[in-house]
Image (tube, rainbow, N blue to C red):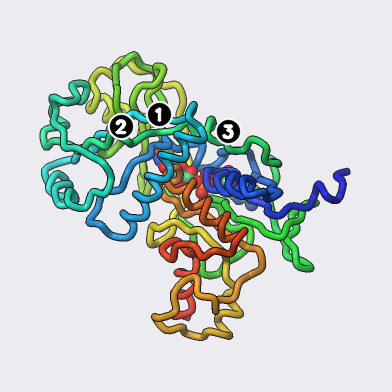
């Protein structure tokens, strides 16, 4: 039997992927008593499958690019400081697929808001010169992390429970999950169904694979051209990732194709041997921005706010809340980029009730829901 005070927490975080682990880390750092639960174990979802590349977004300077690259800079500093043993800053070569893509890259160039340089085939002799015929951009700060090393380090000192399929219930001013209770809960459940229904939030998923191979190939930097091939660290190269939508091929066919494409990019990878195949569901929402913040009480909002005008913005004080219910996720293919910064925002929302950035606030979906109801 657990003593009563061992079952009482300030916050219970549900889901031990990078979203939940980052949030739990920031909460604990602020002095909260935190419990982290997962229905399977740490990194059982997409976070365990990720190549965990930290790469910037290219674009024409829109909000999604800006926030992704803010999160990218934040994540680079965060992992370098907190988990240096699992952080590999090898740089990234982004290579256009074809002539059309090269034109797109050129149009993105004025908007690149992170350090980069233009490079050619002679700068990276390990890459097939044919693949580099349109040149490439090199991001020297880009990196990748080892997901399990990150998870283990960030979870130090946090109470955890594995094999616990959480079904939270709100009763008498607190959240109850089995024998545990807390003032707040954070849903960090990835592409799985939210264990508390939030009628205006729909999270989808895209399946994908990554394969690790053993190789002696000298690959000093990571490269990305349709697929990513990591720098070689201690004889292991990560190749990924596929985006499986309406793909009738089997997993093994997709993995074989990944390897064929990787060898096409880096011919010295021909000697490789498959070590392990990973697969997982990346969670995403329709606008591709992350979700981080407090849940609203949709029913009360409908009664009180009706069809709100365009001037009502996410995080407005008039939006009614469900006591102590928070969510984080929808990170798409960039969970390790978004995790640390979004985790901090959610922790600050819980502790100080500070508004989150309106670009990531779940309220944007509440307002759409109310306007279309
Ligand atoms: C093949 C592949 C390659 C990728 N490559 C990269 C990359 O290079 N760089 C990058 O930044 N991102 C990458 N991603 C994306 C990244 O993995 C995701 O964005 C990120 O892992 C999502 O983290 P999460 O914590 O939101 O979800 P998840 O990691 O899916 O975690 C959710 C967790 O919640 C648990 N859970 C769900 N419901 C419950 C419940 N009711 N009770 C208890 N536990 C529950 C699950 O068991 C799971 O462990 C990749 C993804 C895939 C699949």
Picture quarter containing residue 360? bottom left
Where 360 sits versus 124, above or below? below
Q: Residue at x 37, y 49 (%)?
A: 245
- In the picture provided, is 248 more to the left or to the right than 205? left
Q: Is residue 198 above or below residue 298?
A: above
Q: Position of residue 270 (x, y in %)?
A: 28, 18
When asked about the image quadrant of residue 272, the answer is top left
Q: Position of residue 327 (x, y in %)?
A: 56, 58
Residue that appears at 27% across and 39% down: 226
Q: Within 10 Å of the Cα at label 2, are there few (<14), some (14-19), or many (20+) other Cα atoms?
A: many
Q: Tell which circle, 1 or 3, labels the residue nearer the N-terminal end.
A: 1
Q: Is mark 3 within 8 Å of ligand 1?
A: no
Which residue is label 2 attached to?
Answer: 91
Q: Is residue 257 visible?
A: no
Density class for disc 1 (Cα within 10 Å; few <14, some 14-19, many ≥20) is many
- Of residues 225 and 78, the one drawn nearer to the viewer in this rendering: 78
Q: Quadrant of residue 164?
A: top right
Q: Which residue is mark 1?
A: 88
The percent coordinates of residue 221 (x first, y second) are: 29, 27
- Mark 3 residue element: helix
Q: For the residues marked 2 and 1, what is the alpha-carbon distance in whole angstroms?
A: 9 Å
Q: Nearer the viewer, residue 122 or 141?
A: 141
Residue 331: x percent and y percent? Answer: 44, 51
Answer yes or no: is residue 331 visible. yes
Per the image, the residue denoted by label 3 is 153
Task: Please tell me which residue is depicted at 24% across the width and 53% down the height of the picture.
Answer: 59
């Amino acid at each position: 039997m657990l003593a009563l005070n061992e079952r009482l927490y300030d916050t219970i975080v549900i889901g031990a992927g990078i979203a939940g682990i980052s949030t739990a880390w920031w909460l604990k750092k602020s002095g909260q008593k935190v419990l982290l639960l997962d229905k399977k174990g740490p990194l059982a979802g997409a976070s365990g499958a990720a190549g965990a590349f930290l790469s910037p977004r290219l674009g024409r300077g829109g909000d999604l690019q800006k926030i992704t690259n803010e999160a990218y800079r934040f994540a680079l500093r965060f992992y370098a400081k907190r988990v240096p043993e699992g952080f590999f800053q090898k740089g990234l070569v982004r290579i256009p697929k074809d002539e059309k893509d090269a034109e797109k890259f050129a149009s993105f160039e004025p908007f690149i808001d992170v350090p980069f340089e233009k490079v050619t085939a002679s700068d990276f002799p390990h890459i097939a010169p044919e693949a580099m015929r349109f040149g490439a951009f090199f991001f020297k700060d880009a990196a990748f992390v080892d997901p399990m090393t990150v998870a283990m380090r960030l979870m130090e000192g946090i109470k955890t429970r594995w094999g616990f399929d959480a079904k939270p219930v709100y009763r008498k001013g607190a959240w109850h999950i089995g024998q545990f209770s807390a003032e707040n809960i954070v849903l960090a459940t990835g592409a799985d169904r939210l264990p508390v229904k939030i009628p205006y939030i729909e999270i989808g998923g895209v399946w994908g694979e990554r394969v690790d191979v053993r190789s002696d190939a000298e690959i000093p930097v990571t490269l990305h051209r349709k697929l990513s091939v990591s720098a070689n660290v201690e004889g292991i190269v990560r190749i990924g990732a596929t985006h499986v939508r309406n793909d009738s091929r089997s997993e093994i066919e997709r993995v074989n194709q990944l390897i064929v494409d990787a060898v096409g990019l880096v011919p010295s990878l021909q000697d490789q041997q498959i070590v392990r195949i990973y697969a997982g569901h990346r969670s995403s929402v329709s606008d591709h921005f992350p979700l981080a913040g407090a849940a609203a009480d949709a029913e009360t909002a409908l009664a009180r706010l009706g069809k709100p005008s365009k001037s009502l913005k996410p995080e407005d004080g008039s939006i009614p809340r469900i006591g102590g219910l928070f969510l984080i996720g929808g990170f798409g293919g960039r969970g390790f980029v978004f995790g640390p910064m979004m985790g901090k925002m959610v922790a600050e929302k819980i502790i100080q009730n500070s508004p989150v950035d309106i670009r990531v606030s779940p309220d944007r979906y509440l307002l759409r829901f109310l306007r279309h109801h």
